[in-house]
C-alpha cells in the first residue's frame, strides 16, 4: 500500500487514466466513423450489384431473370397498374423483407419503370440480400485493433509517466537523501538549493532556514547543558566529600549513618546524571575527543562488573559473566574512560529493567563473520519493548517509572559510533540484548 501512495506511482496512474480515457473516447469515435464507412461501402456494393441484376431482368416477350451468385438471395416482382403483383423469382426462404437487415442478411431494394409493347407502364422491383458476416468480421477486426491501440496507449502512458515522474521527482529525492544524511550526521551541512526558480528551490531554501533555526536552538540547549553541568560538578563534589568525611566521624550517632548513606548515594546518582548531561552536550556537537589506546576489553568489563556488583546484590539481582576463553586476545583500540562509561550504562540499564530475582548475563566473545570482539549484556523482560530503534534516542524511557533521564543508551550508542560501530539491539525469547562491537587488535 505504501508504494501506491508514492508521487511517482500516483503520477503514472493519473497519466495512464487520462491517456486511457482520451484513447477510449477517441477509439469509440473512430469506431463509429469506421463502422459508418464500412456500412456505407457495403450498402453501395450491394446496391450496385442489385442495379446490375435489375438491368438484366426482362419481362417481354418472355420473363428473363439472372440468377444470384453464391451467398446471395434474390426476389423479383412486376407490378402493373390495376393488376395483381406478379413474382418472377425468389430465392428459397427469402420472403419480402421489411427492413434492411433480416436474420443476419443485409438487404437492398431497387426498382425501374418500363413501358411495354402495348404502351402500358409497369414497375420491376428487385430485392437483393447477402450475408452480413463479412461486415461483422471487419468490424470485429476494427474493434480488436482499437483495443490493442488502447492497451498500447496505456503502456506508453505508464512508461512516459514513470520516466517523467522520475525526472520531475529526482530533485525531491536528492533533497530527501541529503536530509536523511543530515539527520544521521547533524552539523552545519545544508541542502543544495538548485537555481531553478521553481517550487523545488523554494522547498530546499525553506528547509535550510528550518535547519538553521533548529541548529541555533540545539546549540543554545547544548551550551546550557554544558554550562549547567560544569557549574554543578564542583558543588556536588564538595557535598560528596563533606558527607564522606562526616560519615567517618567517630562521634556520629549510628542513627544518622543510614540517612547519610542514602544522601551519599543520591549525590553519586546526581553526579552521574551531571556527567551524562556533559557528555550529551559534547556528543551532540561532536566535540567529544577520543584518546585511543590499546585496551583489554575483558579486563575493562570485569572491572565495571565488580564496581556494580554491590548494587546488583542490594537489588536482589544476579550478575553472570561468561568469557570465551578460545579468543586469543580481547585487546581493542579505544578510549578506556569512554568505553567504561558505555559498559557501566549497559549494566545499569539491565539492573534497572530486569525483573526482581532475575539474572543479568554478560558475555564476551568474537564474531565469526567479522572477527570483531564483542561484549553484550542481556536481561529478561517483563514485556516487549516494541520498536528498538527508539531506545537509542535521547530522553526516551521504556519504563517511565524507572530512574534515569533516558540518556544511557543514547550516550552509549553515540560513543560506540565514535569507536566505529553502533550498538546492536535485539529482543528474542524474552531477553533484551545490547552488543558492543569493536575490532580486535592482532596479538603481538
Image: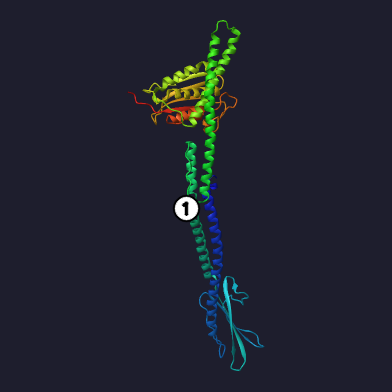
Q: In which quarter of the view is residue 95 placed?
A: bottom right
Circle 1 SS class: helix
Camera-side residue of 29 and 162: 162
Camera-side residue of 297 and 71: 297
Where residue 213 sits: x, y (%)? 54, 38
Specify the farthest residue to the top.
Answer: 251
Camera-side residue of 336 and 115: 336
What kind of colouring is applied to the model shown?
rainbow
Q: In which quarter of the view is residue 273 placed?
A: top right
Q: Is residue 110 visible?
A: yes
* Image quadrant containing the N terminus: top right
The answer to whether 33 is drawn above or below residue 119 in the figure is above
Where residue 65 sits: x, y (%)? 54, 84
Camera-side residue of 231 and 328: 231
* Image quadrant containing the C terminus: top left
Mark 1 = which residue? 163
Specify the farthest residue to the left.
Answer: 444
Where residue 13 sits: x, y (%)? 54, 53
Residue drawn at x 58%, y 15% as measured from the top left? 262
How many marks do you count on the picture?
1
Where residue 76 sits: x, y (%)? 58, 82
Q: Is residue 314 visible?
A: no
Circle 1 crowding by C-alpha within 10 Å: few under 14, some 14–19, many from 20: some
The answer to whether 373 is drawn above or below residue 111 in the figure is above
Specify the farthest residue to the bottom.
Answer: 118
Residue drawn at x 53%, y 26% as measured from the top left? 227
Amino acid at each position: 500500500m505504501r508504494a501506491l501512495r508514492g508521487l511517482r506511482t500516483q503520477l503514472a496512474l493519473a497519466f495512464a487514466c487520462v491517456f486511457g480515457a482520451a484513447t477510449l473516447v477517441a477509439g469509440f469515435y473512430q469506431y463509429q466513423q469506421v463502422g459508418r464507412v464500412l456500412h456505407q461501402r457495403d450498402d453501395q456494393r450491394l446496391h450496385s450489384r442489385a442495379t446490375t441484376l435489375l438491368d438484366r431482368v426482362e419481362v417481354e416477350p418472355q420473363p428473363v431473370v439472372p440468377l444470384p451468385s453464391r451467398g446471395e438471395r434474390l426476389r423479383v416482382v412486376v407490378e402493373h397498374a390495376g393488376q395483381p403483383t406478379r413474382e418472377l423469382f425468389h430465392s428459397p426462404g427469402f420472403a419480402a423483407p421489411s427492413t434492411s437487415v433480416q436474420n443476419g442478411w443485409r438487404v437492398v431494394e431497387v426498382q425501374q419503370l418500363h413501358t411495354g409493347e402495348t404502351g402500358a407502364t409497369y414497375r420491376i422491383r428487385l430485392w437483393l440480400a447477402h450475408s452480413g458476416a463479412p461486415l461483422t468480421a471487419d468490424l470485429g477486426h476494427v474493434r480488436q485493433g482499437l483495443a490493442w491501440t488502447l492497451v498500447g496507449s496505456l503502456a506508453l502512458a505508464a512508461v512516459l509517466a514513470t520516466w517523467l515522474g522520475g525526472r520531475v521527482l529526482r530533485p525531491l529525492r536528492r533533497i530527501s537523501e541529503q536530509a536523511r544524511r543530515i539527520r544521521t550526521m547533524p552539523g552545519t551541512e545544508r541542502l543544495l538549493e538548485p537555481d531553478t526558480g521553481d517550487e523545488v528551490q523554494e522547498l530546499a531554501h525553506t528547509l535550510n532556514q528550518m535547519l538553521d533555526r533548529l541548529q541555533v536552538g540545539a546549540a543554545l540547549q547544548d551550551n546550557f547543558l554544558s554550562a549547567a553541568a560544569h557549574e554543578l560538578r564542583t558543588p556536588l563534589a564538595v557535598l560528596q566529600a563533606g558527607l564522606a568525611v562526616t560519615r567517618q566521624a567517630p562521634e556520629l550517632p549510628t542513627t544518622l549513618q543510614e540517612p547519610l548513606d542514602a544522601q551519599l548515594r543520591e549525590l553519586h546518582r546526581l553526579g552521574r546524571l551531571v556527567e551524562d548531561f556533559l557528555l550529551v552536550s559534547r556528543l551532540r556537537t561532536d566535540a567529544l575527543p577520543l584518546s585511543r589506546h590499546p585496551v583489554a576489553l575483558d579486563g575493562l568489563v570485569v572491572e565495571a562488573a565488580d564496581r556494580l556488583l554491590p548494587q546488583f546484590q542490594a537489588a536482589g539481582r544476579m550478575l553472570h559473566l561468561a568469557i570465551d576463553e578460545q579468543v586469543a586476545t580481547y585487546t581493542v583500540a579505544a578510549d578506556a574512560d569512554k568505553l567504561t562509561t558505555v559498559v557501566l550504562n549497559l549494566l545499569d540499564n539491565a539492573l534497572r529493567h530486569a525483573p526482581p530475582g532475575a539474572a543479568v548475563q554478560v558475555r564476551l566473545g568474537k564474531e565469526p563473520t567479522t572477527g570483531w570482539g564483542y561484549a553484550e549484556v542481556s536481561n529478561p523482560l517483563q514485556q516487549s519493548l516494541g520498536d528498538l530503534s527508539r531506545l537509542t534516542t535521547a530522553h526516551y524511557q521504556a519504563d517511565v517509572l524507572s530512574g534515569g533521564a533516558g540518556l544511557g543508551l543514547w550516550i552509549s550508542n553515540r560513543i560506540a559510533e565514535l569507536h566505529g560501530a553502533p550498538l546492536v539491539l535485539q529482543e528474542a525469547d524474552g531477553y533484551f540484548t545490547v552488543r558492543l562491537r569493536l575490532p580486535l587488535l592482532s596479538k603481538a
